[in-house]
Image: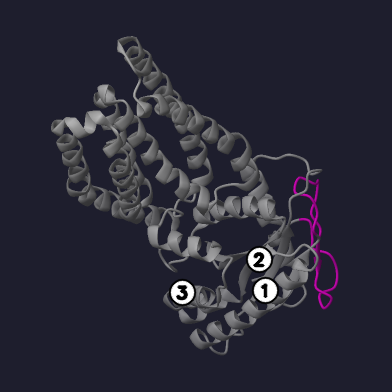
C-alpha cells in the first residue's frame, strides 16, 4: 500500500513543494472555514425548505456532511499534522474529499448554485496550480464521479435540464480553459524555483535549498525517531588547482565533484554546494543506535570517490577531500532555538569536524560529538585515526 502511494505521488507530483508542511496547515484551516460555511448555508437552506414542506434527503445530509468534514479537518490540523506531518495518504484523501464535499453541497442545495459553482471551480484549478496538471485531473475526476453518483437521487437535477447543462459546461471549461494555463504556470514556477535553489556552476542545490532540505529533514527525523547526518566536504589543495591550472580547470573540478556526488547519492540523501569548494550531503533515516558509525562510513566512501574524480581532472596535485560529520536527533531537553539558528549550528558543528580532519592530515573523516543543538560549544572529536579535538574556530583553515 505504501509503495503504491509513493508511486502515485511520483506520478501526480503532489509532494513537490518544499514548504508542504506549512501549506497543508493553511489548507487545513481553510477546509475548516469552508466546510463550516457550507454547513451553515445548507442548514439555512434546509430550514427554508422545511418551512415550505418536506426537506429533501440530500439537502438534509449536506449540513451533517459539511460539519463532519469540518471536524475531520480540525482533527487533521490539531492532531495529525503536528504528530505525523504531511502524509501522501492524507494529502490525496483531502484533495479528493474537497471536491466531493463541494459536489455534495452543490447537488444537495441547488438553490445556492451561484455560491457553490465558483467554489468548485476554484478548488479544482487551485489543486492544479499548486501540485500540477495531473492533480487537477484527480480533483476534476473526483468531482465528476461524485456528481454522477449523487445527481440521480436529486429531483431538482433530474427534472431541471438547465442545471445539468450548466454543470456539464463548467466541468468541460475547467480542463479546456484552465488546463493549458495551469501547465504553463507550473512550468514557470518550477523554472523559477530551480533558478532560485540551484547552483549555476554545478547544478546541485545551493545554500537556500540546503536550508530548506535541512528543515524538512529535521521534521522527518522527529516524526520517525531517526538520526540526521550533516556531512560537510572541503576540497584539499583546491587553491593549487586554480594557481597552477587556472580557474577554468578549477570550475571543471567543482563540476566533476558535483557529478560524482550526484551519481553516488542514495535514497534519503541530498547534496548541495555550500559555496566555494565546500559541499554538503544530508543523510536521513539513520538508526539511533549506530547511525554515527554508518554516517562516518558513508562519508569515507564519498571522500574516496571525490578523490578519484578530482584526480581525473587535476592529476598530480594531490587534490582530495576532507569531511566533517555531525549527527543530529531530536532532544526535548535541548535549549530551544529559532529554526534558522538550529540549521546554522548543525552546519557549524560539521564544519568544526571537517577542520579537525584537515588538521589531522587531509583526505580524512572526522565526526563531531553528538550533543543537543543549543549547547554553549560543540567539540569535534575526530575518527580514531585523527587525534585531538578541533579548535574552537575554523579561521586560518589549511587549504
The image's colouring method is one colour
Could you tell me how far apart the alpha carbons at marks 2 and 3 are, in whole angstroms?
A: 19 Å
Name the outermost residue toward the bottom.
316
Q: Are marks 3 and 1 in contact (CB under 8 Å)?
A: no
Locate the C terminus and report the quarter of the image it occupies: bottom right
Crowd tier of the residue under label 1, counting other residues whose Cα lies within 10 Å: few below 14, some 14–19, many 20 or above = many
Tag count: 3
Front position in the image: 229 or 78: 78
x and y, in percent, of residue 106 in the image: 30, 31
Q: Secondary structure at mark 1?
A: helix
Height in image: 244 above or below 210? Answer: below
Front position in the image: 346 or 97: 97
x and y, in percent, of residue 333 in the image: 81, 43
Q: What stretch of residues is rendered in magenta?
A: 370-392
Q: Is residue 175 left or right of residue 56?
A: left
- Image quarter for residue 43? top left
x and y, in percent, of residue 2 in the image: 55, 62
Height in image: 126 above or below 283? Answer: above
- Seen at 38% across and 13% down, the residue is 47
Disc 3 marks which residue? 255
Disc 1 marks which residue? 299
Q: Are marks 2 and 1 in contact (CB under 8 Å)?
A: yes
Disc 2 marks which residue? 231
Q: Within the magenta stretch, is there residue 155?
A: no
Locate the N terminus and report the quarter of the image it occupies: bottom right
Amino acid at each position: 500500500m505504501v509503495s503504491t502511494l509513493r508511486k502515485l505521488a511520483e506520478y501526480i507530483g503532489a509532494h513537490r513543494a518544499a514548504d508542504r508542511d506549512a501549506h497543508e496547515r493553511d489548507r487545513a484551516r481553510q477546509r475548516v472555514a469552508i466546510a463550516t460555511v457550507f454547513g451553515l448555508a445548507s442548514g439555512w437552506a434546509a430550514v427554508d425548505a422545511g418551512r415550505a414542506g418536506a426537506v429533501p434527503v440530500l439537502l438534509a445530509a449536506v449540513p451533517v456532511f459539511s460539519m463532519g468534514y469540518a471536524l475531520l479537518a480540525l482533527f487533521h490540523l490539531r492532531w495529525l499534522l503536528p504528530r505525523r506531518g504531511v502524509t501522501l495518504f492524507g494529502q490525496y484523501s483531502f484533495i479528493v474529499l474537497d471536491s466531493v464535499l463541494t459536489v455534495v453541497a452543490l447537488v444537495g442545495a441547488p438553490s445556492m448554485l451561484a455560491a457553490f459553482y465558483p467554489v468548485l471551480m476554484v478548488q479544482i484549478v487551485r489543486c492544479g496550480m499548486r501540485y500540477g496538471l495531473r492533480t487537477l485531473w484527480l480533483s476534476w475526476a473526483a468531482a465528476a464521479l461524485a456528481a454522477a453518483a449523487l445527481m440521480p437521487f436529486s429531483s431538482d437535477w433530474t427534472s431541471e435540464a438547465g442545471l445539468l447543462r450548466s454543470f456539464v459546461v463548467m466541468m468541460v471549461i475547467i480542463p479546456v480553459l484552465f488546463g493549458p494555463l495551469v501547465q504553463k504556470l507550473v512550468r514557470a514556477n518550477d523554472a523559477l524555483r530551480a533558478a532560485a535553489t540551484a547552483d549555476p556552476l554545478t547544478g546541485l542545490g545551493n545554500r537556500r535549498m540546503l536550508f530548506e532540505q535541512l528543515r524538512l529533514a529535521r521534521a522527518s527525523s522527529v516524526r520517525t525517531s531517526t538520526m540526521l547526518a550533516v556531512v560537510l566536504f572541503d576540497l584539499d589543495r583546491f587553491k593549487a588547482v586554480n594557481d597552477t591550472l587556472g580557474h577554468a580547470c578549477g570550475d571543471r573540478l567543482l563540476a566533476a565533484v558535483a557529478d560524482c556526488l550526484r551519481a553516488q547519492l542514495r535514497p534519503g540523501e541530498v547534496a548541495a554546494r555550500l559555496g566555494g569548494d565546500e559541499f554538503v550531503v544530508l543523510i536521513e533515516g539513520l538508526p539511533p543506535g549506530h547511525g554515527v558509525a554508518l554516517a562516518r562510513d558513508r562519508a569515507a566512501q564519498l571522500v574516496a570517490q571525490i578523490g578519484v574524480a578530482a584526480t581525473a581532472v587535476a592529476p598530480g596535485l594531490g587534490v582530495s577531500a576532507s569531511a566533517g560529520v555531525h549527527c543530529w536527533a531530536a532532544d526535548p531537553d535541548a535549549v530551544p532555538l529559532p529554526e534558522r539558528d538550529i540549521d546554522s549550528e548543525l552546519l557549524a558543528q560539521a564544519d568544526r569536524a571537517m577542520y579537525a580532519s584537515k588538521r589531522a592530515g587531509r583526505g580524512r573523516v572526522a565526526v563531531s560529538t553528538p550533543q543537543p543543538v543549543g549547547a554553549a560549544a560543540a567539540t569535534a572529536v575526530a575518527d580514531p585515526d585523527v587525534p585531538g579535538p578541533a579548535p574552537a574556530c575554523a579561521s586560518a583553515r589549511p587549504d
